[in-house]
Image (cartoon, coloured by chain):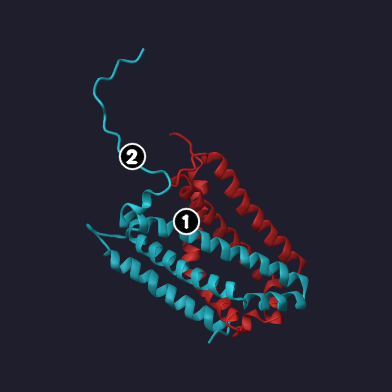
Amino acid sequence: MARSNKPIVWGPFAAGGTLTAFLTPALVILTLLAALGNVPEVLAYDRLHAIAAHWLGKAAFIAVIFLSLWSVAHRLRITLYDIGVRADTAVAVAVYSAAGLASIAAAVFLFRL
Amino acid sequence: MAEKVTRRPYVREVPRTRWFFRHPRYLRYMAREVTCLFIGAYTLLMVVGLHRLAQGRASWEAFLEMLRSPWSIAFHGLALGFSLYHTITWFNLTPKALPVQIGEGFLPDAVIAGAHYAVWALLSLILLKLAGAY
């Protein structure tokens, strides 16, 4: 059978798509409340710092950010192809690298806490 | 040498960038795909937030203050709308992605999608409660 790298790309896409479907609306509501001047407890400095300083919190943040960005990158790649950008290999390298780099940046910030 | 083609094949022209305005189905597809821009931007906002959090209390307070700008409120409104659209389209596809066979038949689509909606609502309520949103 022909080998393909599709499962490697598609696995995190499906995982990230499912994760963002369950999680992102609630997360947006939390910062929307803060944007409207009604900061929820979890976004108070001490609370959020305590969560992000814990190893479990770090792991959760990294997992959520990486899977979300990877699924976004994959969808963006497909959409760019759909609107006429046919340099798929270049697009793929660009979007997946951007997702990886932003996730690494998030990990670096978390370990500076 | 290629044979000379005497007939004139019909080539339906498809505009490269605007094709999805042609049919509501294409437009819904594109709306679903565009949700990724808002989810991506929101996730990057989270990364920026972690950066500000790591810089200390004053920097985090400034980040919260920045969230209160009209641009931020407008962005959050759009991000909420598009993230909900992603959730709805994703769950409506679950019966196709995860068909459950029972004997000869399959579990009805509405049951599979409905179970996802129910779990989603419950998880969101628990998360918002734990976060002190209500």
Residue lying furthest left: B104
Left or right of B64? Residue B85 is left
Name the residue: 36% across, 54% down: B21
Q: Going by the picture, which residue comes out furthest to the top?
A: B1
Res. B4 in view:
yes
Chain letter matching colour cyan: B
Residue A91: % across, % down: 55, 44
Q: Which mark is residue B55?
A: none
x and y percent of residue B31 in the render? Answer: 41, 59
Residue A27: % across, % down: 55, 73
For disc 1, the chain is: A
Residue at 65% from the left image edge and 71% from the top image edge: A57
Please identify the quadrant where the C terminus of chain A is shown: bottom right
Say which of B38 and A55 sits in front. Answer: B38
Q: Amino acid at mark 1?
A: Ala
- Residue at which label 1 appears: A14
Nearest to the observer: residue A9 or residue B31? B31
| Residue A90 vertical position relative to residue A102 in the rendered view, above or below | above
Q: Secondary structure at mark 1?
A: helix
Q: Is residue A51 above or below residue B34?
A: below
Residue visible at 56% across and 75% down in the picture? B73
In-image side of B113 versus A17 (left or right) = left
